[in-house]
Amino acid sequence: MTDAKSYNQEKFDSAINQINFRATIENQREKIKESFLNNCIYPYNGGFFNLSVSFLSEIHYLKMTQTGKTIILDINLNPVEIDDISAFNTDIKNHYFESLIEYKNQLSDLTKSRFISTMTKLDQDVEE
Amino acid sequence: MTFGFLYYAHNNDAVNYLKLAICSILSGQYHIKDFECQIVTDSESIKSLDFSDQIILSRICKNITIDNNYKHKKENYRNFFSANKNAGKQLWHNKTRPNAYNDSIFDETILIDVDFIFQDSNLKNLQGSNQSIMMNKDFICLLSDKRVNDINFITKEKLGNFSIPMFWATVVYFKKDSFAKEFFDVVNDIQDNYFYYQKLYQVDDSSYRNDYAFTIALHKMNGFKLPGKEYEIPYKFALMTQLDELFRVDPSSTKVIVDNRDPKLPYLLLNIENISYHCLNKFTLLIKYQQFLKAYNK
C-alpha cells in the first residue's frame, strides 16, 4: 500500500514538474515576444513607428518612388517628416532585422532548454 | 533641450523610498547613456541613509532638491503589504508629485516612480517626442496569457467598475509647454478637490492615487473624451505585483518568483530580460538592495 502510494506520489510529482516546465516555458516565451514588440517601436523625428514587414515594404516602395524628403504617418497617425527616405529605409531595416535575430536566438535558446534553471538562465553566472 | 528623469522619494515608517530610488537610478545609468536625474526628497529621508549610501546617492544624482514641506498636505494612508509581510496602513507621501512641472529642472522630463527598474533603454527614445504628455496605459503581466484569462486577472485597470480606463502615473513624459503646465494645474486642482472627483469618477480606492488624478486630468484636458493612443507611451513595462518576489538580480535580467494564483502550481520562476519593470512589492526590492548595488554599482 505504501509502495503504491509513493509510486502515485512520484507520478504526481513528475506530472507537477512537467506542468511547471510547460507553464514556465510558455510564460518565458510570451515575455520574449513582448520584449521583441517593444524593440520594434522605432522613434524618428518625434514620431514612433511600429516596425513590421508591411511597414518595411511601404517604406521600400516610397524609397523606389520618391527621393529626399517625404512625409509618413506614425503609429498615432501624426505626420512625420522623413529627411532622407533612403537612409531611413536602411536604418529601420537594420533595426528590425537585428531585433528579429535577437528574438530568434532567444526563442531558440528557450526551446533547447530542458530544465527550468536553464530557460530562466538561473544556472548562468552573474555578469561582472 | 535638456532631458532627464525626476524622482520623488519621501520615506515613511515602512519603506525607505530613497534606497528604492538608488536602485532605480543605478539600473537607469547602466542601461541609458548620459542618464540625467533629479530627486525631490526631504532631510529626514536623507538622514535615514547610511553614510555609504549617502555617498552613492551624491555620486549618482547631482540634482537633489530638498522639500521639507511635503507633510503640509492632508495625510494620505495606504496598506503596505507583500506576500509575506504586512506593514499595515502607513502614511503615503505621494501628494507632491503634481508639483513636478515646477520642480523639474529639465525641458523634457520623465516623472518616474522609485520602484521602476530599468532593463532596457527604451524610455530614452521619448526624448524629442511630438507629444506634450505621455503615460502608460497597458503593462506586461508576469502571468501567462492563459492564466490571465483563466482567473480573469485585470490587465487593463479602471478607476472604478463603471469608470474610465486608468493610465499609470508610474512613467509620465512631459515637456515644458503650455499644455503640460495646464495639465499639472488640473492635477493639482483634482488633488485639492479629490473627494468630489472621487465621487464623480466612481473611484473605488479610498486613498489618493496619482494614477487616478493624472487619468482624470487627462480626461478633462481631452475635453471629457477618452484620451487616444497619442497619450500612450508606446513602450510597455512589466508589472510585478505585491505578491511576486525578486529571486535574483543580475545586470540586465531579473529572476522573479511569480505568484501564479493556482493552488496546484502556486509559484513560477520567470526571467525578466530586456524589459523594464515596475515592482509594486517594495519590501522585496529593499531585501535585494545589496544585490542591486553589486549588480549595477560599477
Image: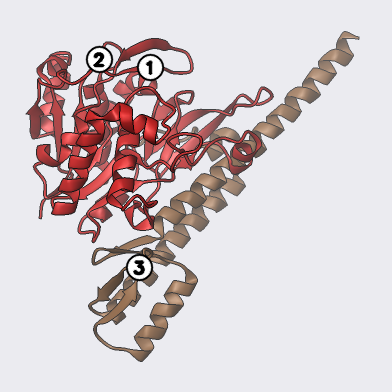
Chain colours: A brown, B red
Chain hosting mark 1: B
The answer to whether tags 1 and 2 share a subunit is: yes
Chain hosting mark 3: A
The amino acid on which the numbered mark 1 sits, given as a three-letter code, is: Phe
Name the spot of residue A38 as percent of width and height, x first. 41, 53
How far apart marks 1 and 2 lie (CA) works out to 11 Å
Q: Above or below — where is B91 with respect to B248?
A: above
How far apart marks 3 and 2 lie (CA) works out to 43 Å
Residue that mark 2 sits on: B12
The amino acid on which the numbered mark 3 sits, given as a three-letter code, is: Asp
Residue B57, picture quadrant: top left
Residue that mark 1 sits on: B80
Name the spot of residue B128 as percent of width and height, x first. 20, 59
Under tag 3, what secondary structure?
A: loop
How packed mark 2 is, by other alpha carbons closer than 10 Å (few <14, some 14-19, many 20 or more), is some
Residue that mark 3 sits on: A74
Residue B113 in view here? yes
Q: Above or below — where is B186 with respect to B243?
A: below
Residue at the spot x=46%, y=68% of the render? A52
How packed mark 3 is, by other alpha carbons closer than 10 Å (few <14, some 14-19, many 20 or more), is some
Q: Going by the image, does B199 lie left or right of B74?
A: right
